[in-house]
Amino acid sequence: MTDLSLQPVAFADPELAAQMRATPAAIDTLFQAYLGRPAEARAQAALKERRASVADVERELRGSEEYRRKARLLRDQDRSQYDGAMLYIAPARAVFCPIAKVANTSVKDWALRLVGDGRPEPGMSHYWLDSGQSRMQARHWAFAARARVDHAPDWVSVALLRDPVDRLVSCYCDKFGRNRMQDSVLHHTRSVYAFFAGGDAPDREMVERGLSFRQFCFYINATAREVQDSHWAAQWSYLQNRRWDRLFALEKIESFEAFLRERLPEDLREIRLGLTNAAQKTRGTPTRDLSDALPGDWMGARTPPYEAFLTDDIRGFIGDYYALDARLHAQARAES
């Protein structure tokens, strides 16, 4: 893997970063985008006096009576918790949808290296992007800037999809198996343990004991889609609010990499994707049913074959609950 010494690459329009102080030109751009007209002099003066940020201006415009009467419809709005996490990879002119448990860490690490902002530790990319220290995520930019990219003919929207059965078993083995005691993982799993503890917070003993894959599936089946953590939420829920130019299947990730590399400038094509945070699993036919087993019964140097966790009823549940994901994954395989 080759990393080049690069200067950071801007996302689209530095004047429209959400937390940046709004310049008169940015204010006019936002008024034009939301109301179809430039800002009046007194509005410019008031916003300048308040040292309003781009996000402040957007918030006031969206709450104004004029906007409610004659709003310009921007295509990119945060309609779900995932929309703000879309990744704008400027060198490839691509909007990427990062779906948890679908090479999410690897692609984020790659994207940061492509703009000359790679992290020394694999996995730090999540914090670096979420916090806005690298402003590649949609949430750090004005809706008007994002709408501008959406209308740009040379930008594409792409996503990676994974077989929903593999994704769910992988999630269980990671979050409820080998990494279950980590504080960062408990942030995602605590509500699942609480479900089986009558609503009480889980104690250390419960987490150490863990849950079976059947219990994990039972929790998902018994609770509302809206409360599911991003790691096992349906993949379609990430994709639902925009059009997608290309879908790629995780098992054909080399096609995804080739597609984006072809769009990169020549001097960046030596920087390869690579895979980080990928656990090794045992291959071959399972020797016993692990659907009701606790982590202590199956954890070892390698994760068991995923088939070991899949009884007929569990397969049926996953097939129903993630039916649309299976259709999208099949489409992605055909397009990859």
Image (cartoon, rainbow, N blue to C red):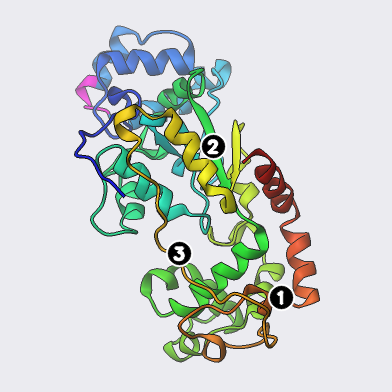
> CA–CA distance between discs 2 and 3?
21 Å
In primary-sequence order, the first of circles 3 and 1 is 3
**Percent position of residue 255, x then y:** 54, 42
Q: What amino acid type is highlighted by mark number 3?
A: Ala
| Most common secondary structure along the magenta stretch | loop
Residue 322 horizontal/vertical position (percent):
71, 57
Q: Which label sits on residue 158?
A: 2
Amino acid type of the residue tagged 2 in the rendering: Val
Question: What is the C-alpha distance between the residues marked 3 and 1?
Answer: 21 Å
Q: Are marks 2 and 3 in contact (CB under 8 Å)?
A: no
Which residue occupies the foreground of this view, 302 or 40?
Answer: 302
Res. 234 in view: yes
Q: Which residue is mark 1?
A: 310
Secondary structure state at the residue bearing disc 2: strand
User: Which residue occupies 41% across, 80% down?
Assistant: 181
The question of residue 276 being in magenta is answered with no
Position of residue 266 measured from the top left corner of the image (x, y, whole percent): 33, 28
Identify the mark at residue 152; answer none if there is no mark.
none
Q: Residues within 10 Å of mark 3 (few under 14, many from 20)?
A: few
Badge 2 density bin: few <14, some 14–19, many ≥20, Cα 10 Å: many
What residue range appears in magenta? 48-52
Mark 3 or 1: in front is: 3
The mark total stands at: 3
Residue 101 against residue 172 in the figure, above or below? above
Q: Which mark is residue 278?
A: 3
